[in-house]
Image (tube, grey):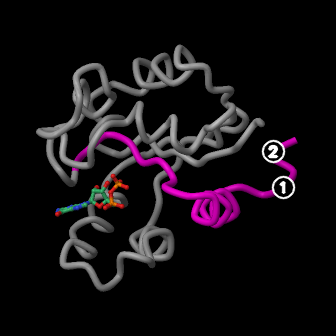
Amino acid sequence: MAQRTFSIIKPDAVRKGFTGAILAEIEKAGFQILAIKRLSISKEQAKGFYAVHSARPFFDPLTTFMSSGPIVLMVLEKDNAIADLRKLMGATNPANADEGTIRKKFAGSIQENAIHGSDAEDTAAFEIGYWFAGYELV
Ligand code: GDP
């Protein structure tokens, strides 16, 4: 059954000119891009998005990084979208990412790792609602 997930092309990848190449990988893997927008977000907006990580030692550098330049936010749809996007992204640390994954190809470090993808149905619902209004998803 078609499932939705939420993804971000992070500031490092946008800065390096990888937006188009990453979108091509996503479409080639069978995802429909249901909604997409390019935004520069504030540190406060980044903190709200990553609230689940607020106790982690990397929370401050992560939210500074995510607000350091434009990002591309997307809602993606396909069967098994959440797990399939995580597989396409590869491991959080690109040094551990499998060949052929987006992070292996485009990420520079464990923090500047090119792409975000929701990790479960409840987080996907929160993340889509955080960045997109219902009328943007019809
Ligand atoms: P993901 O689901 O693979 O994106 O990884 P997590 O949910 O564990 O972490 C969220 C994001 O925080 C990652 O994508 C990285 O950008 C960043 N991050 C995770 N672990 C670390 C770390 O150990 N150090 C730093 N600096 N950033 C990290």
CA gap between label 1 and label 2 equals: 5 Å
Neighbour tally class for label 1: few under 14, some 14-19, many 20 plus, Cα within 10 Å = few
How far across and how far down the image is residue 29, in percent?
A: 53, 19
Quarter occupied by the N terminus: top right
Neighbour tally class for label 2: few under 14, some 14-19, many 20 plus, Cα within 10 Å = few
Amino acid bearing label 2 = Leu
Residue beneath the point at 42% across and 46% down: 70
The residue that mark 2 highlights is 137
Side (left or right) of 101 relative to 126: left
Res 2 → quadrant = top right
The residue that mark 1 highlights is 134
State whether label 1 is within 8 Å of ligand 1.
Answer: no
Height in image: 122 above or below 23? below
- Helix, strand or loop at label 1? It is helix
Counting labels gives 2
Q: Splitting the image into four quadrants, where does ligand 1 fall?
A: bottom left
Q: Give the range drawn in magenta.
A: 112-138
Amino acid bearing label 1 = Gly
Quarter occupied by the C terminus: top right
Residue beneath the point at 70% across and 38% down: 35
Side (left or right) of 39 relative to 105: right
How far across and how far down the image is residue 127, in percent?
A: 60, 61
State whether label 2 is within 8 Å of ligand 1.
Answer: no
- Helix, strand or loop at label 2? It is helix
How far across and how far down the image is residue 25, in percent?
A: 45, 19
For residue 20: magenta?
no
107 or 93, nearer to the observer: 93
Residue beneath the point at 68% across and 31% down: 78
69 or 2, nearer to the observer: 2
Marks 1 and 2 in Cβ contact (< 8 Å): yes
Res 80 → quadrant = top right
For residue 115: magenta?
yes
